[in-house]
Amino acid sequence: MIQLIKRYTFFVAAIFFSQLSSAQKKAPIKPENKDVFIKSLIGKMTLEEKVGQLTLFTSDMSVTGPVMRDSYKADLQSGKCGNIFNAYTPEYTMKLQKLAMESRLKIPLLFGYDVIHGHKTIFPIPLGESCAWDTLLSEQTAGIAATEAAADGLHWTYSPMVDISRDPRWGRVAEGSGEDPYIGSLIARAKVKGYQENIGSNSSVLACVKHFALYGAPIAGRDYNTVDMGYQSMYNVYFPPYKAAIDAGARSVMASFNEINGIPSTANKWLMNDVLRKDWGFKGFIVTDYTGINEMVHHGNVADEYEGGIAAINAGIDMDMQGAVYYTYLKKALDEKKVNMEQIDLAVYRILEAKYDLGLFSNPYKFCSTERAKTQIMNPSQLAKALEAGQKSIVLLKNQNNILPLKKTGKYALIGPYIKDKRDLIGNWSAAGDWTKAVSLYEALNSKIGSSAQLIYAQGANTVSDTTLIKKMQIQAFITPRSDGDLLQEALIAASQAEVIILALGETEGMTGEAASRSNLRIPANQIKLMEALSNLNKPIVLVLSNGRPLDLSWENENMNAILETWFLGTQSGNAISSVLLGEYNPQGRLTMSFPRSVGQVPIFYSAKNTGRPYEENQKYTSKYLDIPNTPLFPFGYGLSYSQFSYSNLSIPKKAFKTGEKIELSLTVSNSGKIKGIETVQFYVRDNVGSSTRPVKELKRFVKLELNPGESKNVVFTISSDDLKYYNYELQHVFEPGEFTLFVGKNSSENESVSIHIGE
């Protein structure tokens, strides 16, 4: 069957493209009135051509880059496929667009791709970059990614992923901004603005908000699993970042794989029509995730793909990604009056409008410039921004006896599989990034101190030795021809000659991301064995972590002298990490996801609710574990600096406020350290009594202060009763007068507080 060929054929073939006459290359010229133009064009389209606009198929990948499947050529020439993903480079997209210009109506193709944290210049994974607590940086990196993607022939990115997640077992936490809806909303807004600024220019792309909705809360942390959630959690915690992205003008939304209230998102009328379009006013188009319609058969809400297609379009899904369900069954559904032409035309309108606003009807080849690609991809300013993003994303978790920063002289053992590694540095979903152009930690340290310090290298261990895990990750090149035993002995010899050990361990890029859930949150066992052996030497060890999720670092926190969380930092990884190790850059990153003491605490997050039996150390029948504290190992908002900051003079001008009044809380922040540093001052609020139970703490504001040694600055946080609204049990967005506690501090656990009454 043709749809099976389209979905499952992975044969790669190059296509011969003949030169077209100038007449064939012309696309319809757009008039001044967009609505008139699009409706006129729809009026000329056959049903087959309309369905083509609702169809999204993929290019394949070969060693040399994207290539088209032979079976798609005729579809492009006949207008049966209006959108392609995984197709990039000006040359390749030009060839595909020329095929579309052979179609009867010459409607240009829309090219999409997963540009998640950079296109060619790779920035830190989103979870890492969120730890910068810098929305301007988030906007700038998205803008650079858009510029590079547009210069490489692309129109549309499947980003930002704004799913809130509180379960580090889920591998896709790497792609989001952590556990908190406030900072998640700020970053969602910034990313959309960065991608879409000046839509219609040659340097912007359409954003696609994903995964709508609740995808970050799968049961047991297992990817693609079902989600079971009450409405208050939806509206108060998980919905805000999606809405922030829509309010920022996101032009497209991707449906999630999971179900909501028993209905998969791909067929969920309440979610797509009532919430997204009616309540939030979304005007763009909605696309499924990869074969999302087909997968409803497995969910069990439809009997077959035909029913799935009907359910999807009736729910408001405009575009079918790779499933070929609309392509195969939409005509039959129309003939049998299961759907109507008005629905189809509306979906077509939304997609044509996106192409119109991109300027593709005026010039379908405007994104196919080889000259722009030469100057707008991986240029010096973009690499400099990648370095800045990497530096700001690093979180210093431990620094016993101020072992960091390191001197630029001495004897250092550089040990671990990530000392010279490059592939893992750019992380998962690294788009068209070339890992060979990444800077390794070894290269950076050798360049900076190789002439003044003695650097002794040993690999120490393979990244992974568990063959079962390797097989599940479907990646072959983890184990070197050498055994972990031999590598360990070399590492011990190297360490014995050094004064300080720099130990680079962590996850591989394939251990996080899609389909990469883990039940064990420790680093791989063979790396643990190396770490334990080195710790027995009683030499200072600086642990440099590469990973895509919060890990269980309880043992490491007890036995390592310093711990530097570096995530997967992208193209400039080595330069960013070395600058922090050597004190060229004072770390300022703060966690946006809590780190558990054990996987048994998961899910763990700072804004939990109290139980009727809150924790009391000396009372057995209260909510606690027998073997570990309730608290996380490293809380939300946590991060150390080479400076020392202190807080004082916390005050509010009066003790009671009327509804609607501005509430100002002020304090003084001082740098008592010896070097200039940046402190992230965090402001939290607790609604002490609500008609619905409220979290123990919620982030409402933060500010980043740069302070010189001995310098103090006054900080004022301003909120009003509008900032304290929440969705109650009737889903009314309300402010309830009463007693509130205001917290200010270094993180969600270390803070000072004052109590006030707000409202009549």
Image (cartoon, rainbow, N blue to C red):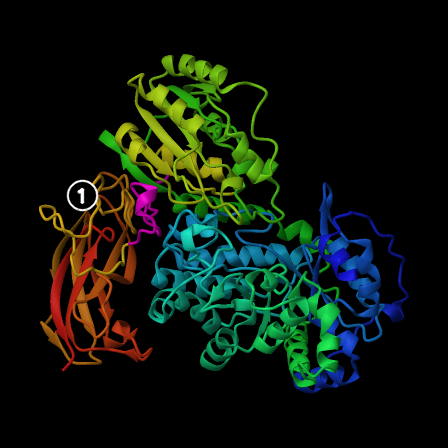
Residue drawn 30% across and 39% down?
397
Whether residue 589 appears in magenta in the rendering, the answer is yes
Confirm whether residue 402 shows in the render.
Answer: no
Q: Amino acid at mark 1?
A: Ser
> Please, is residue 583 above or below residue 479 in the view?
below
49 with respect to 681 (left or right): right
Span colored in magenta: 585-605
Write down the residue under mark 1. Answer: 672
Q: Quadrant of residue 500?
A: top left
Quadrant in which residue 356 is drawn: bottom right
Q: Residues within 10 Å of mark 1 (few under 14, many from 20)?
A: some
- The quadrant in which residue 114 appears is bottom right
**Residue at x-position 63% and y-position 53%:** 376
Q: x and y percent of residue 299 in the render? A: 55, 62
Estimate the x, y position of residue 112 in percent, counting from the top left.
65, 60
Q: Quadrant of the C terminus?
A: bottom left
Left or right of 131, for residue 328: right
The percent position of residue 536, horizontal first and vertical second, equals: 31, 18
Q: Establish if 22 lies above or below 473.
A: below
Q: Is residue 556 visible?
A: yes
- At 46% across and 61% down in the image, what residue appears? 162
User: Is residue 573 found inside the magenta-colored segment of the image?
Assistant: no
> Residue 234: where, in percent of width, then height?
38, 68
Residue drawn at point x = 46 percent, y = 77 percent: 275
Image: 404 above or below 657 = above
Could you tell whether 35 is left or right of 731 in the image? Answer: right
Q: Who is closer to the viewer here, 59 or 576?
A: 59
| Left or right of 173 in this view: 555 | left
Element on which disc 1 rests: loop
